[in-house]
Image (spheres, helix red, strand yellow):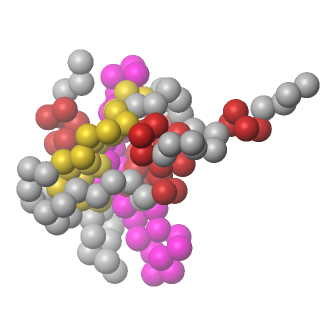
């Protein structure tokens, strides 16, 4: 069973640590592994914008750096009254780690939420199966 309250709290805490001096749009993520570990990530902006790091990818990178590659759930906490789903780049990175895992997007200022899974966020995804050796 997933302790959604704890995962949401971790995502909100990560959001508070985001580095977003340009957009002021802070995002935090908390990723739950199959082993029960939680890895947090916050968005990190850069003046060039193209080099910005999304919270979801920061959390995934932290997990992978610590030897984790099987995930159960991720919570993404954003600014404003409407929760925002992960961007396309983050969706593509999430699909790299099958099987599909649960995704919950929450707002820091309202009870609004999105509840879905990775496969639903990116149907017909390009994945490693397309690169498999057919010999």
Q: As drawn, is 122 to the left or to the right of 2?
A: right
Q: Tell me if residue 27 can be seen.
A: yes
Name the outermost residue toward the right: 135
Q: Is residue 47 magenta?
A: yes
At 31% from the left and 77% from the top, the residue drawn is 23
The answer to whether 50 is drawn above or below residue 73 in the figure is below
Q: In this rendering, would 117 be left or right of 78?
A: right
Up the image or down, 16 lies above or below 11; here it is below
Seen in the picture, residue 73 relative to 36 is either above or below; the reply is: below
Q: Position of residue 93 (x, y in %)?
A: 53, 46
Is residue 80 left or right of 124 when viewed as pictured?
left
Q: Residue furthest front?
A: 124
- Picture coordinates of residue 103, whole percent (x, y): 33, 39
Q: Which residues are magenta?
A: 28-53
Q: Is residue 11 left or right of residue 9?
A: right
Q: Quadrant of the C terminus?
A: top right
Residue 20's quadrant in the figure? bottom left
- Residue 17, percent from left and from top: 26, 59
- Where is the N terminus found, in terms of image quarters? top left
Decide whether residue 49 is among the magenta residues.
Answer: yes
Where residue 25 appears, x then y in whole percent? Answer: 27, 70
């Amino acid at each position: 069973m997933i302790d959604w309250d704890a995962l949401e709290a971790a995502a909100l805490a990560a959001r508070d640590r985001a580095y977003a001096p340009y957009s002021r749009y802070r995002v935090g993520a908390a990723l739950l592994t199959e082993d029960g570990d939680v890895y947090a990530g916050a968005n990190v902006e850069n003046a060039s914008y193209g080099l910005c790091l999304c919270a979801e990818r920061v959390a995934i990178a932290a997990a992978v750096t610590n030897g984790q590659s099987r995930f159960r759930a991720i919570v993404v906490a954003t600014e404003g009254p409407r929760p925002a789903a992960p961007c396309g780049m983050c969706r593509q990175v999430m699909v790299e780690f099958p099987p599909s895992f649960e995704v919950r997007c929450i707002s820091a200022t309202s009870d609004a939420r999105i509840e879905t899974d990775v496969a639903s966020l990116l149907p017909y995804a390009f994945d490693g199966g397309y690169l498999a050796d057919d010999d």
